[in-house]
Amino acid sequence: MKMGMITVVGIGEDGLDGLSPAARALVEGAEVLIGGERHLDKVPDIKAERLDWSAGFDAALDELEARLGKRIVVLASGDPLYFGVGATLIRRFGAERVFVLPAPGAVSLTCARMGWSIPDTDVVTIHGRALESLNLHLAPNARLVVLLRDGDSPAEVADLLVRRGFGPSRLTVLEHLGGSAENHIEGVAESWSGERCANLATLALECLAGPKARSLSRMAGLPDDAYEHDGQLTKREVRAVTLARLAPLAGEMLWDVGAGAGSVAIEWMRANRANTAVAIERDPDRAACIARNATALGVPRLDIVTGNALELLKTQSGSPDAVFVGGGVGVPGLVQAAWSRLKPGGRLVANAVTVEGTAELAKMKQKHGGDLIQISISRDDNKINNLTLFTPMRTVTQYLANKPLEINDE
Protein backbone atom coordinates (compact mmCIF):
# COMPACT_ATOMS: atom_id res chain seq x y z
CA MET A 1 0.00 0.00 0.00
CA LYS A 2 1.49 3.39 -1.05
CA MET A 3 2.06 6.06 1.55
CA GLY A 4 -0.83 8.51 1.68
CA MET A 5 -3.22 6.07 0.00
CA ILE A 6 -6.66 5.32 1.38
CA THR A 7 -7.86 1.77 0.77
CA VAL A 8 -11.62 1.17 0.76
CA VAL A 9 -12.59 -2.47 1.30
CA GLY A 10 -16.09 -3.70 0.64
CA ILE A 11 -17.12 -6.15 3.33
CA GLY A 12 -20.23 -8.31 3.54
CA GLU A 13 -22.21 -9.92 6.31
CA ASP A 14 -19.74 -12.80 6.36
CA GLY A 15 -16.99 -10.45 7.55
CA LEU A 16 -13.32 -11.34 7.07
CA ASP A 17 -14.19 -14.84 5.86
CA GLY A 18 -15.79 -13.38 2.74
CA LEU A 19 -12.79 -11.28 1.74
CA SER A 20 -10.20 -12.24 -0.83
CA PRO A 21 -6.74 -13.00 0.57
CA ALA A 22 -5.45 -9.66 -0.74
CA ALA A 23 -8.30 -7.66 0.81
CA ARG A 24 -7.96 -9.52 4.10
CA ALA A 25 -4.24 -8.80 4.21
CA LEU A 26 -4.89 -5.11 3.72
CA VAL A 27 -7.45 -5.03 6.54
CA GLU A 28 -5.20 -7.00 8.89
CA GLY A 29 -2.25 -4.73 8.11
CA ALA A 30 -4.12 -1.46 8.66
CA GLU A 31 -2.86 1.08 11.17
CA VAL A 32 -6.14 3.01 11.02
CA LEU A 33 -9.56 1.42 10.45
CA ILE A 34 -12.58 3.58 9.76
CA GLY A 35 -16.17 2.52 9.19
CA GLY A 36 -19.60 2.21 10.69
CA GLU A 37 -20.00 0.42 14.00
CA ARG A 38 -21.46 -2.62 12.23
CA HIS A 39 -18.46 -2.88 9.91
CA LEU A 40 -15.90 -2.43 12.68
CA ASP A 41 -17.61 -5.14 14.74
CA LYS A 42 -16.86 -7.62 11.94
CA VAL A 43 -13.10 -7.27 12.49
CA PRO A 44 -12.83 -7.40 16.31
CA ASP A 45 -9.27 -8.75 16.45
CA ILE A 46 -7.54 -6.22 14.19
CA LYS A 47 -5.12 -4.15 16.29
CA ALA A 48 -5.54 -0.74 14.67
CA GLU A 49 -6.73 2.69 15.67
CA ARG A 50 -10.48 2.80 15.06
CA LEU A 51 -12.57 5.70 13.83
CA ASP A 52 -16.29 5.67 13.08
CA TRP A 53 -18.86 7.96 11.49
CA SER A 54 -20.69 8.82 14.70
CA ALA A 55 -19.59 12.47 14.63
CA GLY A 56 -20.56 12.82 10.97
CA PHE A 57 -18.74 12.25 7.69
CA ASP A 58 -16.99 15.60 7.59
CA ALA A 59 -15.54 15.26 11.10
CA ALA A 60 -14.42 11.68 10.45
CA LEU A 61 -12.79 12.63 7.14
CA ASP A 62 -10.94 15.46 8.89
CA GLU A 63 -9.60 12.87 11.35
CA LEU A 64 -8.68 10.60 8.46
CA GLU A 65 -6.84 13.40 6.64
CA ALA A 66 -4.73 14.05 9.73
CA ARG A 67 -3.50 10.42 9.51
CA LEU A 68 -2.73 10.25 5.78
CA GLY A 69 0.81 9.07 6.36
CA LYS A 70 -0.46 5.83 7.93
CA ARG A 71 -1.91 2.66 6.43
CA ILE A 72 -5.62 3.61 6.31
CA VAL A 73 -8.42 1.17 5.49
CA VAL A 74 -12.04 2.25 5.22
CA LEU A 75 -14.62 -0.52 5.59
CA ALA A 76 -17.83 -0.20 3.58
CA SER A 77 -20.81 -2.33 2.62
CA GLY A 78 -20.44 -4.35 -0.57
CA ASP A 79 -19.45 -2.13 -3.48
CA PRO A 80 -18.25 1.18 -1.96
CA LEU A 81 -18.85 3.05 -5.22
CA TYR A 82 -22.54 2.09 -5.46
CA PHE A 83 -24.41 4.57 -3.24
CA GLY A 84 -21.43 4.10 -0.91
CA VAL A 85 -18.67 6.00 0.85
CA GLY A 86 -16.18 5.43 -1.98
CA ALA A 87 -17.52 8.34 -4.03
CA THR A 88 -17.40 10.65 -0.99
CA LEU A 89 -13.74 9.79 -0.39
CA ILE A 90 -12.82 10.33 -4.03
CA ARG A 91 -14.50 13.73 -4.08
CA ARG A 92 -12.55 14.72 -0.96
CA PHE A 93 -9.12 13.23 -1.70
CA GLY A 94 -9.07 12.54 -5.45
CA ALA A 95 -9.19 9.26 -7.34
CA GLU A 96 -5.40 8.94 -7.34
CA ARG A 97 -5.39 8.73 -3.52
CA VAL A 98 -8.22 6.20 -3.13
CA PHE A 99 -7.95 2.47 -3.92
CA VAL A 100 -11.24 0.54 -3.89
CA LEU A 101 -11.67 -3.21 -3.45
CA PRO A 102 -15.38 -3.96 -3.93
CA ALA A 103 -17.29 -7.00 -2.69
CA PRO A 104 -20.70 -8.26 -3.88
CA GLY A 105 -23.15 -5.54 -2.85
CA ALA A 106 -26.82 -5.49 -1.93
CA VAL A 107 -27.94 -5.05 -5.54
CA SER A 108 -25.97 -7.95 -7.01
CA LEU A 109 -26.87 -10.22 -4.08
CA THR A 110 -30.56 -9.32 -4.29
CA CYS A 111 -30.67 -9.98 -8.04
CA ALA A 112 -28.81 -13.25 -7.51
CA ARG A 113 -31.39 -14.42 -4.95
CA MET A 114 -34.32 -13.32 -7.13
CA GLY A 115 -32.87 -14.63 -10.40
CA TRP A 116 -33.11 -11.18 -11.99
CA SER A 117 -30.87 -9.75 -14.69
CA ILE A 118 -29.09 -6.74 -13.18
CA PRO A 119 -29.23 -4.58 -16.38
CA ASP A 120 -33.00 -5.15 -16.52
CA THR A 121 -33.53 -4.05 -12.91
CA ASP A 122 -33.86 -0.46 -11.68
CA VAL A 123 -32.25 0.51 -8.39
CA VAL A 124 -33.83 3.12 -6.14
CA THR A 125 -32.54 4.26 -2.78
CA ILE A 126 -34.80 5.68 -0.08
CA HIS A 127 -31.93 5.70 2.39
CA GLY A 128 -31.58 9.40 3.12
CA ARG A 129 -33.95 10.25 0.26
CA ALA A 130 -37.68 10.76 -0.05
CA LEU A 131 -39.93 7.71 -0.21
CA GLU A 132 -41.77 9.39 -3.09
CA SER A 133 -38.69 8.94 -5.29
CA LEU A 134 -40.25 5.55 -6.00
CA ASN A 135 -43.14 7.21 -7.86
CA LEU A 136 -40.90 7.83 -10.86
CA HIS A 137 -40.29 4.09 -11.30
CA LEU A 138 -43.77 2.63 -10.79
CA ALA A 139 -44.82 0.93 -14.01
CA PRO A 140 -46.41 -2.44 -14.82
CA ASN A 141 -43.91 -5.31 -14.64
CA ALA A 142 -41.04 -3.09 -13.51
CA ARG A 143 -38.49 -4.80 -11.26
CA LEU A 144 -36.90 -2.63 -8.61
CA VAL A 145 -34.25 -3.17 -5.99
CA VAL A 146 -35.01 -0.69 -3.22
CA LEU A 147 -32.24 0.25 -0.79
CA LEU A 148 -34.04 0.84 2.49
CA ARG A 149 -33.70 3.38 5.28
CA ASP A 150 -34.59 1.04 8.16
CA GLY A 151 -36.90 -1.78 9.26
CA ASP A 152 -40.05 0.32 8.82
CA SER A 153 -39.35 0.99 5.14
CA PRO A 154 -41.08 -2.09 3.64
CA ALA A 155 -44.39 -1.16 5.28
CA GLU A 156 -44.01 2.42 4.03
CA VAL A 157 -43.30 1.20 0.50
CA ALA A 158 -46.32 -1.13 0.63
CA ASP A 159 -48.56 1.75 1.74
CA LEU A 160 -47.29 3.96 -1.09
CA LEU A 161 -47.90 1.20 -3.63
CA VAL A 162 -51.48 0.75 -2.47
CA ARG A 163 -52.13 4.50 -2.64
CA ARG A 164 -50.73 4.62 -6.19
CA GLY A 165 -52.89 1.70 -7.37
CA PHE A 166 -50.09 -0.89 -7.36
CA GLY A 167 -51.50 -2.95 -4.49
CA PRO A 168 -51.00 -6.34 -6.26
CA SER A 169 -47.21 -5.76 -6.42
CA ARG A 170 -45.00 -8.48 -4.94
CA LEU A 171 -42.49 -7.59 -2.24
CA THR A 172 -39.54 -9.64 -1.03
CA VAL A 173 -37.54 -8.33 1.92
CA LEU A 174 -34.04 -9.80 2.07
CA GLU A 175 -32.51 -9.45 5.52
CA HIS A 176 -28.78 -9.78 6.34
CA LEU A 177 -27.85 -10.73 2.77
CA GLY A 178 -24.78 -12.93 2.52
CA GLY A 179 -24.59 -13.71 6.25
CA SER A 180 -25.56 -16.63 8.45
CA ALA A 181 -28.74 -14.80 9.52
CA GLU A 182 -29.98 -14.23 5.96
CA ASN A 183 -33.79 -14.35 5.82
CA HIS A 184 -36.44 -13.61 3.18
CA ILE A 185 -39.95 -12.26 3.80
CA GLU A 186 -42.39 -12.38 0.89
CA GLY A 187 -45.78 -10.80 0.45
CA VAL A 188 -48.12 -8.55 -1.52
CA ALA A 189 -48.35 -4.80 -0.96
CA GLU A 190 -52.11 -4.65 -0.34
CA SER A 191 -51.93 -7.35 2.34
CA TRP A 192 -48.52 -6.49 3.79
CA SER A 193 -48.48 -7.12 7.53
CA GLY A 194 -46.64 -3.94 8.44
CA GLU A 195 -44.33 -5.92 10.72
CA ARG A 196 -40.94 -4.33 11.17
CA CYS A 197 -38.04 -6.10 9.47
CA ALA A 198 -34.34 -5.99 10.25
CA ASN A 199 -32.68 -2.62 9.74
CA LEU A 200 -30.13 -4.28 7.46
CA ALA A 201 -32.37 -5.33 4.60
CA THR A 202 -33.03 -4.79 0.90
CA LEU A 203 -36.39 -4.87 -0.89
CA ALA A 204 -37.04 -6.61 -4.20
CA LEU A 205 -40.19 -5.17 -5.78
CA GLU A 206 -42.13 -6.55 -8.74
CA CYS A 207 -44.61 -3.87 -9.78
CA LEU A 208 -48.08 -5.10 -10.71
CA ALA A 209 -50.76 -2.57 -11.58
CA GLY A 210 -54.23 -2.73 -10.07
CA PRO A 211 -57.34 -1.42 -11.86
CA LYS A 212 -56.87 2.10 -10.42
CA ALA A 213 -53.16 2.42 -11.21
CA ARG A 214 -52.06 5.20 -13.48
CA SER A 215 -48.84 4.48 -15.30
CA LEU A 216 -47.03 7.52 -16.69
CA SER A 217 -44.39 7.47 -19.41
CA ARG A 218 -40.93 8.90 -18.81
CA MET A 219 -41.20 10.59 -22.22
CA ALA A 220 -42.06 14.28 -22.45
CA GLY A 221 -45.69 15.35 -22.71
CA LEU A 222 -47.53 13.91 -19.71
CA PRO A 223 -51.31 14.43 -19.74
CA ASP A 224 -52.32 17.83 -18.41
CA ASP A 225 -54.40 16.21 -15.68
CA ALA A 226 -51.27 14.55 -14.27
CA TYR A 227 -50.59 17.97 -12.75
CA GLU A 228 -52.31 20.04 -10.12
CA HIS A 229 -52.53 23.55 -11.59
CA ASP A 230 -54.54 26.78 -11.67
CA GLY A 231 -54.36 27.14 -15.44
CA GLN A 232 -50.71 28.24 -15.51
CA LEU A 233 -49.47 25.09 -17.20
CA THR A 234 -47.51 24.52 -20.39
CA LYS A 235 -50.02 22.36 -22.23
CA ARG A 236 -49.16 18.80 -23.16
CA GLU A 237 -48.46 19.21 -26.87
CA VAL A 238 -46.48 22.43 -26.43
CA ARG A 239 -44.61 20.87 -23.50
CA ALA A 240 -43.54 17.91 -25.62
CA VAL A 241 -42.14 20.25 -28.28
CA THR A 242 -40.50 22.40 -25.60
CA LEU A 243 -38.70 19.44 -23.98
CA ALA A 244 -37.61 18.16 -27.39
CA ARG A 245 -36.02 21.53 -28.11
CA LEU A 246 -34.44 21.78 -24.65
CA ALA A 247 -32.92 18.34 -25.40
CA PRO A 248 -32.05 17.17 -21.85
CA LEU A 249 -28.87 15.13 -21.51
CA ALA A 250 -27.86 13.05 -18.50
CA GLY A 251 -26.59 15.07 -15.57
CA GLU A 252 -27.60 18.48 -16.91
CA MET A 253 -29.17 21.35 -14.98
CA LEU A 254 -32.26 23.31 -16.13
CA TRP A 255 -33.61 26.60 -14.83
CA ASP A 256 -37.38 26.83 -15.39
CA VAL A 257 -38.22 30.55 -15.16
CA GLY A 258 -41.84 31.41 -14.42
CA ALA A 259 -42.46 27.75 -13.72
CA GLY A 260 -46.24 27.85 -13.10
CA ALA A 261 -47.10 24.25 -12.23
CA GLY A 262 -43.48 23.13 -12.73
CA SER A 263 -44.27 20.77 -15.59
CA VAL A 264 -41.21 21.49 -17.76
CA ALA A 265 -38.76 21.22 -14.85
CA ILE A 266 -40.44 18.03 -13.64
CA GLU A 267 -40.34 16.32 -17.04
CA TRP A 268 -36.73 17.45 -17.50
CA MET A 269 -35.84 15.58 -14.28
CA ARG A 270 -38.00 12.57 -15.19
CA ALA A 271 -36.00 12.19 -18.41
CA ASN A 272 -32.90 11.04 -16.50
CA ARG A 273 -32.33 10.37 -12.81
CA ALA A 274 -29.08 12.38 -12.90
CA ASN A 275 -30.80 15.54 -14.16
CA THR A 276 -31.44 18.47 -11.84
CA ALA A 277 -33.61 21.55 -12.16
CA VAL A 278 -34.48 24.82 -10.43
CA ALA A 279 -38.07 26.03 -10.71
CA ILE A 280 -38.30 29.82 -10.30
CA GLU A 281 -41.82 31.01 -9.47
CA ARG A 282 -42.91 34.33 -7.95
CA ASP A 283 -46.27 33.16 -6.55
CA PRO A 284 -45.95 31.22 -3.23
CA ASP A 285 -49.16 29.26 -3.81
CA ARG A 286 -47.92 28.09 -7.20
CA ALA A 287 -44.52 27.26 -5.69
CA ALA A 288 -46.29 25.01 -3.16
CA CYS A 289 -48.21 23.42 -6.04
CA ILE A 290 -44.93 22.74 -7.87
CA ALA A 291 -43.64 20.94 -4.77
CA ARG A 292 -46.72 18.72 -4.65
CA ASN A 293 -46.46 17.93 -8.36
CA ALA A 294 -42.76 17.10 -8.08
CA THR A 295 -43.42 14.73 -5.19
CA ALA A 296 -46.35 13.01 -6.90
CA LEU A 297 -44.37 12.53 -10.11
CA GLY A 298 -41.28 11.09 -8.45
CA VAL A 299 -38.81 14.00 -8.51
CA PRO A 300 -39.01 15.45 -4.97
CA ARG A 301 -35.41 16.73 -5.36
CA LEU A 302 -36.62 19.56 -7.61
CA ASP A 303 -35.24 22.84 -6.22
CA ILE A 304 -37.99 25.47 -5.97
CA VAL A 305 -37.09 29.14 -5.56
CA THR A 306 -39.79 31.72 -4.86
CA GLY A 307 -39.42 35.38 -5.79
CA ASN A 308 -39.09 37.90 -8.59
CA ALA A 309 -37.56 36.13 -11.59
CA LEU A 310 -35.56 39.13 -12.82
CA GLU A 311 -33.97 39.59 -9.40
CA LEU A 312 -33.37 35.87 -8.87
CA LEU A 313 -31.63 35.58 -12.24
CA LYS A 314 -29.04 38.01 -10.86
CA THR A 315 -28.45 36.17 -7.58
CA GLN A 316 -29.09 32.47 -8.22
CA SER A 317 -25.83 30.53 -7.97
CA GLY A 318 -24.45 28.36 -10.73
CA SER A 319 -24.73 28.30 -14.51
CA PRO A 320 -27.44 26.10 -16.05
CA ASP A 321 -27.00 23.92 -19.10
CA ALA A 322 -30.45 24.96 -20.31
CA VAL A 323 -32.99 27.63 -19.47
CA PHE A 324 -36.70 27.63 -20.20
CA VAL A 325 -38.65 30.87 -19.87
CA GLY A 326 -42.33 30.05 -19.77
CA GLY A 327 -43.73 32.92 -17.73
CA GLY A 328 -43.03 36.63 -17.85
CA VAL A 329 -41.50 36.56 -21.33
CA GLY A 330 -42.96 39.99 -22.02
CA VAL A 331 -41.12 41.55 -19.08
CA PRO A 332 -38.41 43.73 -20.66
CA GLY A 333 -34.97 42.24 -20.10
CA LEU A 334 -36.10 38.93 -18.57
CA VAL A 335 -35.16 36.65 -21.47
CA GLN A 336 -31.85 38.51 -21.93
CA ALA A 337 -31.11 38.04 -18.21
CA ALA A 338 -31.77 34.31 -18.58
CA TRP A 339 -29.46 34.20 -21.60
CA SER A 340 -26.71 35.95 -19.63
CA ARG A 341 -26.78 33.27 -16.92
CA LEU A 342 -26.76 30.38 -19.40
CA LYS A 343 -23.60 28.27 -19.59
CA PRO A 344 -21.65 28.69 -22.86
CA GLY A 345 -22.81 25.93 -25.19
CA GLY A 346 -26.19 25.77 -23.43
CA ARG A 347 -29.72 26.07 -24.82
CA LEU A 348 -32.38 28.71 -24.22
CA VAL A 349 -36.03 28.05 -25.05
CA ALA A 350 -38.73 30.64 -24.40
CA ASN A 351 -42.46 30.51 -25.12
CA ALA A 352 -44.72 33.52 -25.64
CA VAL A 353 -48.46 33.85 -26.25
CA THR A 354 -48.73 37.66 -26.10
CA VAL A 355 -47.72 40.28 -28.66
CA GLU A 356 -45.37 41.80 -26.09
CA GLY A 357 -43.70 38.47 -25.40
CA THR A 358 -43.35 37.71 -29.11
CA ALA A 359 -41.72 41.11 -29.62
CA GLU A 360 -39.14 40.31 -26.91
CA LEU A 361 -38.34 37.01 -28.61
CA ALA A 362 -37.94 38.76 -31.97
CA LYS A 363 -35.38 41.07 -30.32
CA MET A 364 -33.50 38.05 -28.95
CA LYS A 365 -33.34 36.46 -32.40
CA GLN A 366 -32.05 39.69 -33.93
CA LYS A 367 -29.35 40.00 -31.25
CA HIS A 368 -28.29 36.39 -30.67
CA GLY A 369 -29.53 34.41 -33.65
CA GLY A 370 -31.44 31.18 -33.11
CA ASP A 371 -34.85 30.45 -34.58
CA LEU A 372 -38.50 31.22 -33.99
CA ILE A 373 -41.37 28.85 -34.63
CA GLN A 374 -45.11 29.08 -33.97
CA ILE A 375 -47.05 26.17 -32.51
CA SER A 376 -50.78 26.00 -33.23
CA ILE A 377 -52.82 23.18 -31.68
CA SER A 378 -56.54 22.44 -31.88
CA ARG A 379 -58.37 19.95 -29.71
CA ASP A 380 -61.65 18.18 -30.51
CA ASP A 381 -63.31 19.11 -27.23
CA ASN A 382 -66.23 21.16 -28.51
CA LYS A 383 -69.54 19.56 -29.49
CA ILE A 384 -72.53 21.33 -31.03
CA ASN A 385 -75.61 19.33 -32.07
CA ASN A 386 -73.64 16.08 -31.76
CA LEU A 387 -71.02 17.36 -34.19
CA THR A 388 -67.40 17.50 -33.06
CA LEU A 389 -65.56 20.75 -33.62
CA PHE A 390 -61.90 21.55 -33.08
CA THR A 391 -61.18 24.33 -30.59
CA PRO A 392 -57.93 26.16 -31.27
CA MET A 393 -55.57 26.78 -28.35
CA ARG A 394 -53.54 29.96 -28.11
CA THR A 395 -50.76 30.05 -30.66
CA VAL A 396 -47.36 29.83 -28.99
CA THR A 397 -44.31 31.56 -30.39
CA GLN A 398 -41.21 29.62 -29.39
CA TYR A 399 -37.62 30.82 -29.49
CA LEU A 400 -34.61 28.49 -29.42
CA ALA A 401 -30.99 29.59 -29.33
CA ASN A 402 -27.73 27.81 -28.55
CA LYS A 403 -25.21 29.95 -26.72
CA PRO A 404 -21.80 30.03 -28.43
CA LEU A 405 -18.82 28.70 -26.54
CA GLU A 406 -17.21 32.12 -27.01
CA ILE A 407 -19.83 34.69 -26.19
CA ASN A 408 -20.46 38.38 -25.95
CA ASP A 409 -23.45 39.23 -23.76
CA GLU A 410 -23.25 42.97 -24.37
Image (tube, helix red, strand yellow):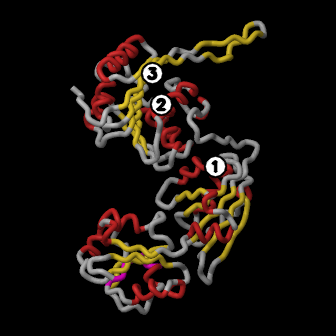
At 67% across and 64% down in the image, what residue appears?
A: 116
Q: Earlier in the sequence, mark 1 or mark 2?
A: 1
Q: Position of residue 384 (x, y in %)?
A: 73, 8
Between the C-alphas of marks 2 and 3, the distance is 10 Å
Residue 319: assigned label: none
Q: Nearer the viewer, residue 205 or 378?
A: 378
When asked about the image quadrant of residue 406, the answer is top left
Q: Which residue position holds label 2?
A: 245
The picture places residue 84, in percent across and down from the top left corner, at 45, 67
Query: Magenta stretch?
Result: 32-38
Looking at marks 3 and 1 on the same chain, the residue that comes earlier in the sequence is marked by 1
386 vs 196, left or right, is right
Residue at numbered disc 1: 138
Residue 67, given in percent of the width and then of the height, sits at: 25, 79
Horizontal arrangement in the rendering, residue 87 relative to residue 377 (left or right): left
Residue appearing at x 38%, y 22% in the figure: 328
In the picture shown, does residue 8 fall above or below 239?
Answer: below
